[in-house]
Image (spheres, rainbow, N blue to C red):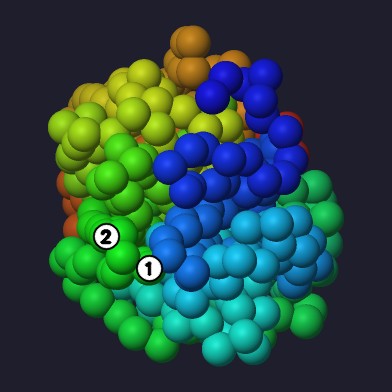
């Protein structure tokens, strides 16, 4: 599917598989999936708030009226992939996620996003800029009914769907959802198309290994966590970005450069035009943390202030 097809709503990918896309794919605007079998279907991820998830549930009714959702798989724990879970739980849908993802699907995570939107100053301004359209107040954190580690197969009305845990990478518990007979993969946030990936967990070399695994798989259609439906060319492109960042950050670490100076000194070149380019701050920090496990690990609010500064929201919280 080309970027010309990148429109909001339901997309039929063939072979009984669908995607629900939310352009423009930036912070919070994520994708969901639907895999049908005989008389049932499996959903891949919910959306960032209840209104968006309700809209999706209404929009996919042409499929789910005859293939009701029986299982929901969350590819990872970030809110833009799980905050709509409660609406599926109300329908007695079984929710499945990796053990590592389940540990992070908490009400505290919901509250943290509510709180950052209420902050004064540049960081709050940036949070309202990226999260303003989303309503977190009604969200009740709803974790999985069943967890797994490693790999697992799910029967969806007579067809096999494979769950493959590849995290920690983007987050602690990232999972790929593979539909072998359709040669199709729902990658979650292991793949960003048209935007900058962010390594909340890492290490980045493990994320690169996950992309290598995708490149070795017999798949031709890939639904990313954010961005238009793609193929392996986009996997290779994102891999090149991560290799670049890991190499540049490692070189500066070995030269003894402090992390903030390392971030400032990296010329992103062709990657500087990518949306969310400020996520470089977290990606470089992640490399430094892997090379120096004793390094202080700032919380996400501090990281967000660094990203905000790189994207034109200069913050006094960032010291150089």
Residue 167 location, quadrant: bottom left
Residue 216 position in % (x across, y down)? 16, 32
The answer to whether residue 120 is left or right of residue 302 is: right
Which residue in the rendered view is the most extreme toward the top? 270
- Secondary structure at numbered mark 1: loop
**Label 1 Cα neighbours within 10 Å, binned few <14 / some 14-19 / many ≥20:** some
Side of 85 relative to 105 (left or right) = right
Mark 1 vs mark 2: give the one in front. Answer: 1
**Residue 25: percent from the left, percent from the top?**
64, 39
The residue depicted at 34 percent of the width and 85 percent of the height is 146
Q: Quadrant of residue 56?
A: bottom right
Q: Which residue is mark 1?
A: 157
Tag on residue 255?
Answer: none
- In this picture, is 74 found above or below 295? below
Number of numbered discs overlaid on the protein picture: 2
Q: Nearer the viewer, residue 81 or 182?
A: 182
Are the residues flagged by discs 1 and 2 in contact, CB closer than 8 Å? no
Q: Is residue 226 above or below residue 33?
A: above
The quadrant in which the N terminus is found is top right
Q: Is residue 91 above or below residue 12?
A: below
Say few, some or many: other residues with alpha carbon within 10 Å of mark 2 (under 14 / 14 to 19 / 20 or more). Answer: some
- Give how far apart the Cα atoms at labels 1 and 2 are: 9 Å
Foreground: 118 or 29?
Answer: 29
Q: Note whether residue 116 is visible.
A: no
Residue 143 position within the rendered picture, expressed as x and y whole percent measured from the top left:
48, 83
Residue with the mark numbered 2 = 160
């Amino acid at each position: 599917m080309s970027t010309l097809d990148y429109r909001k709503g339901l997309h039929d990918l063939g072979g009984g598989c669908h995607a629900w896309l939310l352009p423009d794919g930036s912070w919070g605007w994520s994708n969901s999936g639907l895999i049908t079998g005989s008389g049932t279907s499996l959903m891949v991820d919910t959306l960032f708030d209840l209104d968006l998830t309700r809209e999706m549930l209404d929009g996919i009714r042409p499929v789910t009226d005859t293939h009701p959702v029986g299982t929901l798989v969350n590819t990872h724990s970030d809110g833009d992939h799980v905050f709509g879970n409660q609406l599926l739980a109300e329908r007695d849908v079984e929710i499945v996620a990796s053990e590592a993802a389940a540990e992070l699907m908490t009400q505290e995570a919901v509250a943290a996003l509510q709180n950052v939107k209420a902050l004064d100053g540049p960081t709050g301004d940036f949070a309202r800029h990226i999260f303003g359209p989303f309503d977190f107040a009604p969200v009740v954190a709803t974790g999985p009914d069943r967890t797994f580690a490693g790999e697992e197969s799910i029967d969806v009305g007579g067809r096999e769907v494979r769950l493959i845990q590849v995290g920690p990478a983007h987050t602690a518990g990232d999972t790929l959802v593979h539909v072998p007979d359709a040669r199709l993969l729902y990658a979650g946030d292991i793949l960003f198309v048209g935007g900058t990936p962010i390594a909340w967990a890492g290490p980045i070399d493990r994320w690169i290994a996950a992309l290598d695994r995708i490149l070795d798989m017999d798949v031709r259609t890939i639904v990313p966590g954010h961005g238009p439906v793609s193929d392996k060319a986009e996997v290779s492109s994102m891999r090149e970005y991560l290799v670049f960042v890991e190499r540049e950050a490692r070189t500066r670490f070995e030269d003894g450069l402090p992390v903030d100076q390392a971030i400032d000194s990296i010329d992103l070149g062709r990657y500087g035009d990518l949306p969310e380019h400020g996520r470089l701050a977290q990606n470089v920090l992640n490399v430094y943390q892997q090379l120096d496990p004793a390094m202080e690990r700032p919380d996400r609010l501090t990281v967000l202030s660094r990203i905000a500064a790189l994207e034109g929201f200069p913050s006094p919280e960032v010291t150089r």
